[in-house]
Image: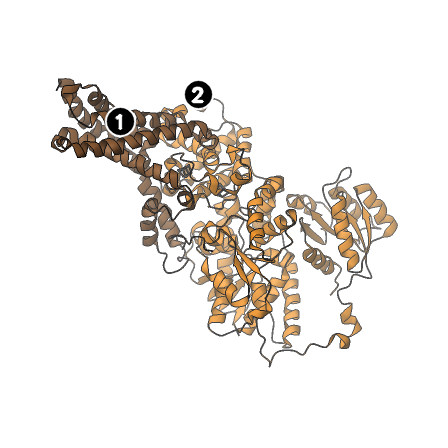
Chain colours: A brown, B orange
Amino acid sequence: MSELLRFSENELQEYALLIMACVYTLRIIWLLHFKAGRERQAPTGQFRTTRARGIVYSWMNIAMPWEMESTRTKAFFYVQFVVFHLGVVAAIGLSFVIPYAPGVLKSGAAVLIFQTVIGLAFLVSLLRLVRRATDKYIRAISSPDDYFSLALLAVWFFFAVFAAPNRPERGEAFLLGFFMLTAFFLIYVPFSKISHYLYYPFTRYYFGKTMGYRGVYPLAKSKQ
Amino acid sequence: MSDTRAAQSHKAKKLIERMSRKLNRQMAGSLAACVHCGMCTEACHYVLTNPDDPTYAPAYKADRIRKIFKRHFDWTGRVLPWWVGAKTVRTDAELEELKDIVFGKCTNCRRCSINCPMGVDYATFNRMARGLLVSVGIMPEGVAVVSKDQWEIGNQMGVLKEEYIDTLEWMSEELSGDMGDPNAVIPIDKMDADIVYSINPREVKYDPRTIADAAKIFYLAGENWTMPSEGWDMTNFGLFSGDDDLGGAVALRLYEKVSELRGRKLVISECGHGYRSTRCEGPNWAAHTVPFEMESSVNTMLRYIKEGRIKVDKTRNDVPVTFHDSCNNARSCGLFEEPRELLNLVVTDFREMVPNRSENYCCTGGGGAMSMSEYTPRRLKSARVKADQLKATGAKIVVTSCHNCVDGLTDLIRHYKLGMDVTQLVNLVANAVVVPEKIAVEKPAESEKPAAVAVEHSLEAFKILVVDDEDDIRLYYTVLLEDNGAKVIQASDGDEALKLAKSEKPDLITLDLNMPGKDGGQVFEQLRKDPELAEIKVCIITGRPELRRLIYDRPVPPPEGFLDKPVDDHALLLNIRKILEVG
Ligand code: SF4
Ligand code: SF4
C-alpha cells in the first residue's frame, strides 16, 4: 500500500471528519439561534393524536410509505429512495470498514453485498440525474448544487463499487479515488443540500410536534 | 455578491429586515431543508390543473421565498449564492411578482406540507411571506380592504353593529314564531352563560338562516347561551394576510368579550379559518392564555345528540350528501371524524368524496382567495380538481363546515355546472331536529293561511332597476326578481342607468361597479347627490369586493346594501327583501 493511500484512508478521513463535525455543530447552533415557536392554545383533535405521538410518527414517516399520498402513489420512486440511501449508508460504512476492519472484506459475500447495494445506488443516482435534467418540474427547481451533489454521489458510488474488494495490490486508483472523494464529501456536505439529513430530524420534530398537538398527526388518511 | 450591492428599494430593504424578526426555528428548518425532490408537486391543485407550467409547483413557489432566506440568513447562500440558488429581492416590481405567487398561486391549504418527506411546511412560510409583503404595503386590493374593515369596523365584511343586532332580532322573532314560545329568543350579552356563540359576518350578510338554525338547536337543547353584541366576529383576516398583529387584535377582541360576559365556553360557528384562527392561532398571535374553553359548533351539536339533549330524525334529510373537509379545520386543526359522525346521525345517504380527510383537496376559495378578484380565473381553473371530486360522488348536496368553502364551492359548482347545493351541518341538524310536542306549533293549513301571509315575501309592489354590463347577469337577476313579483327594468351602462332612474323612479337599484363609460361608483354618487333620486335604495353587487372602500369613502350616504359576486338566488332575494323591508 502506498503512503498516499495509507494517508487517504486514515489521517485525511480523520481531518475531514473533524471539519465536518465542526461545521455541523455550527449548523446546529445556527438553527437553534432562531426562536422556537410556542403553542399557547389547548390541543385540538382526538385523543390518539398527541405531541409525543406526532413527533414519533413524523420521524417514522419516511419508513411508512403507505402513510403519505406522495410515497404511496409513487412506489417506484420510493424504492429508488430506499436503494439510494442504503447505498449511501453502505458507502459510508465501507469508508470505515476498509481502514478499521479490513478483515470483513476477506469474505466474498460481504464484498458482494457492498457492491450490489452500492451498485444499485449508482444506477439510481443515474436515473435521478436523468430525471432532474428532463422532468420540467424538477428542472425548474434545481440549482447547480442539486446537479453537482448528485453527480458527485454517482461518481463516489462508482468508485466505491470497485474499491469494495480492498485489493490495493491490484491497483490503487479506485481506492484512492474513493477515499479522496469521501474526504471531499465530508468537507463539502455541510455546505450543500446533502446536509439535509442533518435537518431532517429537526424539521420532522417540529412539524410532528405541531401536527400532533393539533390533532393532525398521525394522519387521518382518506377512506372510501 | 453583486445582488446585495445593487440599489435596493426601501420596501425590499424593510422586507428583508422584518424577515429576520418573523423567522422561527420551524420556518428556518423548512426553508433550509428542501432537497428539491419534487414529491410535493402533485399534491397541489394548481399543478394538477396547470400541467404545463412548472411555476405552480409548491417547491418552485417556495423557492421564491427560500432564495431570499438563503441569500440573507444562510451562509451557503451568502458565500455561494449562484451555486445554491440564493438571491435577494431588489425592486418593488420583484415584490409584486412575489405577491402574485404567495397570494395568487397558493391557498395555504397545507396539502403539500403533509406530503413532503422532509417535513417542509411551505404553507406556513408562505403565510409569513404574505405578512412581510403586507407590512410593506404590497398586497391584493381585496386584502387591504378586508383587513382595514376588520381593523376599523371589527369584522371583515364591514357589517355595522345596527345591522348585526337587527339581524339577530329578526332571527329571534322567527325563532319565537317557529317555536310558539315568546321565551325562544337569541339572548344578547347575557352574563354568565355556559356558551357564548360567535359567528362569521357572512352569516349576517348572506345566510342569517344559519344563525336561526343554531338558535333553534341551542333553544331545544335547553342551553344557557348568548351572543355578544360586540366582538362577535370569529373570523380573522390575519390568517390570510399573514399579519399577526391583526390576527392577535381580532382574536383578543373576541376573547375579551367572552371574559367580560363571564362566559364559560366559546362556541365557534362552522368556519374553517375562523375555527383555526380563534381556537388554534389566536392565543399565539395575541400572546394571550385563554381562560375558557373553545370548541367548534360541530362538537357542540354532536354532544347534544349524544347526550340526548336534542333528538333528530335523519329521514328528513334523505337526499344524497357528500362532505368537504375544510383545509383549516382538517389539516390544521384535526377536525376529521366529528363532522362525519354528526352527518351520519342526521342524513340517510352520506357518500365520502375521494380523497377525503387529511388528503382532501382545497375548495380553492381558501387563503382569502375569494377576496382577491384579480385571481378569479386562476382560482376557477384550479377548481377543476374539486369539481371532478364532487361530480364523482353523485351527491346532490355538498356539506362543509366552513363559510369560505361554502363560497368557494358555490362558485365552482356554478362555473362547472354541477347542479349541486352547498349547505352546512347546522342546517341539516336544524332540519332533522325533532321539536317536542309541547312546543311544536300547529301550522295553519295552506288554505287557512291569511292572505297577507301568502304574499308576505312577494316583491310585487316594487320596481327594481338592474344595472350590469353583463347580459347573462342582468338576465339572471331579472328572471329571479320577476319570478318573485317585482317589475324589473334593465340598464347596461352608467348613463342608461341614470336616465332610467330619472324616468322610472325605481324603488331599488342593483348596481354593478365595473362598467364601461360611467362606472358604478360615479353613478352611485350622482344618484345620491340628485335630490330627486337620493332616496332610491341602492344595492351594490360587484365582483370586485375590494372596491367597497371606494364606495363607503364617498361623501354621500352609504348604499343600503353591498353584495359580492357571485351571488346566489337566496342571498340576492334575502338582501333585496331586507333593503325593501319585505317579510
Ligand atoms: S417534497 Fe419537500 S423536500 Fe421535496 S421538493 Fe417538496 S418541499 Fe422540497
Ligand atoms: S399549500 Fe396548497 S395551494 Fe399552496 S402550494 Fe401547497 S398544495 Fe398548493
B5 vs B363: above or below? above
- Closer to us: B34 or B128: B34
Q: Residue at x 13, y 18 (%)?
A: A3
Q: State the residue position of label 1.
A: A187
Front position among marks 1 and 2: 1
The circle on residue B2 is 2
Q: Residue at x 21, y 32 (%)?
A: A112
Q: Amino acid at mark 1?
A: Ile
Rendered location of residue B286, percent (x, y): 45, 51
Queried on whether the Cβ of the residue with tag 1 lies below 8 angstroms from ligand 1, the answer reads no
Q: Tag 1, which chain? A: A
- Closer to us: B75 or B478: B478
Kindly state the secondary structure of the residue where label 1 is placed: helix
Q: Tag 2, which chain? A: B
Rendered location of residue B106, percent (x, y): 52, 41
Rendered location of residue B269, percent (x, y): 54, 60
Q: Is residue B473 visible?
A: yes
Q: Residues within 10 Å of mark 2 (few under 14, many from 20)?
A: few
Kindly state the secondary structure of the residue where label 2 is placed: helix
